[in-house]
Image (cartoon, helix red, strand yellow):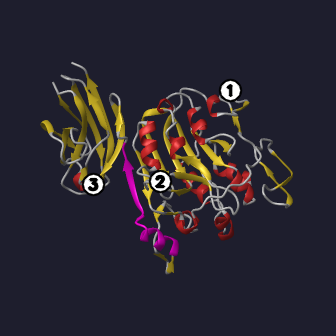
Amino acid sequence: MCPDPVHESRTTAPQTQTLTAPETLPHPLPDSGDKRTIPIWSVARTEASLSGGESSVSDPAKLPTGHRYQVVIVGSPGEAEKAAGHMYQFVRAAESAGVGPDTVWLVERSGYERAQADPAEIRRRAGTAYVFWIDESRSLTDLLNAFPSGSIGEMSAYSHGLPGLLALRHGWPGVRDYGLTTGQARALAPSVFAKDALISFDSCNSATPQDGESLAQVTAQAAGHAVTGWTGRTSYHDYNAQDEDQPQVQPSEILRDGHPDFGEFWSQLRGRYPRHQAIAPRNVPGGFSAWFSMRARLAATRTFSVPAGGWVYAVIESSSETVGIRGLRGDVLLHRSERHRIGSDPTEGTPGAFVVGEPSKVGWTELQGGTYFLELYHLSGEPVTGQLTVEIKAP
């Protein structure tokens, strides 16, 4: 569920107090004169150690090394979600994503405090995952960059979103939105991500460009991995329904269950149609490994540099839920980027081939020096996903 784009203004309000003690005390809600008893939320939960005792993990930097973590970023509700009884929609999405011992939840705190949510309910839904409460006192980029090197194997975000902003807090009158901006995303450290890391933003407008760049594109470039995101608005309807067995984030609709959504109508009138997209980094040094998603054609991977006389090897591990196309052949083209416009760049050497459902390796040798990218296509038009690994060798 996303805000009506008509109301995308951001007002400035005093920063909220950083709260760390896991107890309940009389505390005034920020920006209000109402003094009431609300939960004061702890920064980190207490985890059972491998030896059976207890140890407090107060910072992602102190997480055990040698693990591959699934990081789940959980936004907080706005006033509209509280009024509709949907305070935990992002928490429910996070719950379906992962609750195991190698899962780490990063949960925006202040919006849940304002909604008077129960922190114990969020902890319960997190299962055995680590939980860190986050607020404006430390940026999301700083938290992610604190993870052990190469430890983030998957990162997903469930929250509100505006073009250029993963809005972890949104929709409270007189309180500014905050979260992950494109400027902050540029500072993400690629070293904290695993070589085959998966990154996704299930938030409105994460792939909608602002000033020529989207949050998904900037994150992909900074992290060195493909990022899936949404143009237009998303809907968490499935997570708020009581009878949905396999809920998913869905594209927003102008008319759902007979009820019009004027916010979606206005969004589409502005050209923001809800589509799920995979966005690759524009360029990275050296070889890379990345997830891909395609139907008939993957027009271009990220670009990469090859020295004169160098070699390029690509391993494609693909799969499809459509059983009938498994075993079918697809083509792989290597292009040298000369005009910086997809479709006008010369093809190098003989096209390679990959087989859906089978690991496939292709290669090109003694190449001209320059910037290259790969193009993949197959004729079925059915969805194909997989892992693409590119290795570059000097002569």
Amino acid type, mark 2 = Ser
Q: Residue at x 42, y 42 (%)?
A: 220
* Front: mark 1 or 3: 3
Residue 334 location (% of width, % of height)? 19, 38
Q: Which numbered disc flags the more N-terminal residue, 1 or 3?
A: 1
Q: Rounded to the nearest whole Å, what is the CA distance between mark 1 and mark 2?
A: 41 Å
Q: Rounded to the nearest whole Å, what is the CA distance between mark 1 and mark 3?
A: 48 Å
Mark 1: few, some, or many residues within 10 Å (few <14, many ≥20)? Answer: few
From the viewer's perspective, tell me whether residue 7 is left or right of residue 35: left
| Image: 56 above or below 40 | above
| Image: 315 above or below 293 | above
Residue numbers of the magenta segment: 262-280
Q: Which mark is residue 107?
A: none
Residue 45 location (% of width, % of height)? 71, 40
Mark 3: few, some, or many residues within 10 Å (few <14, many ≥20)? Answer: some
The residue at which mark 2 appears reads as 206
Q: Which numbered disc flags the more N-terminal residue, 2 or 3?
A: 2
Q: Which residue is drawn at 30% across and 47% down?
A: 319
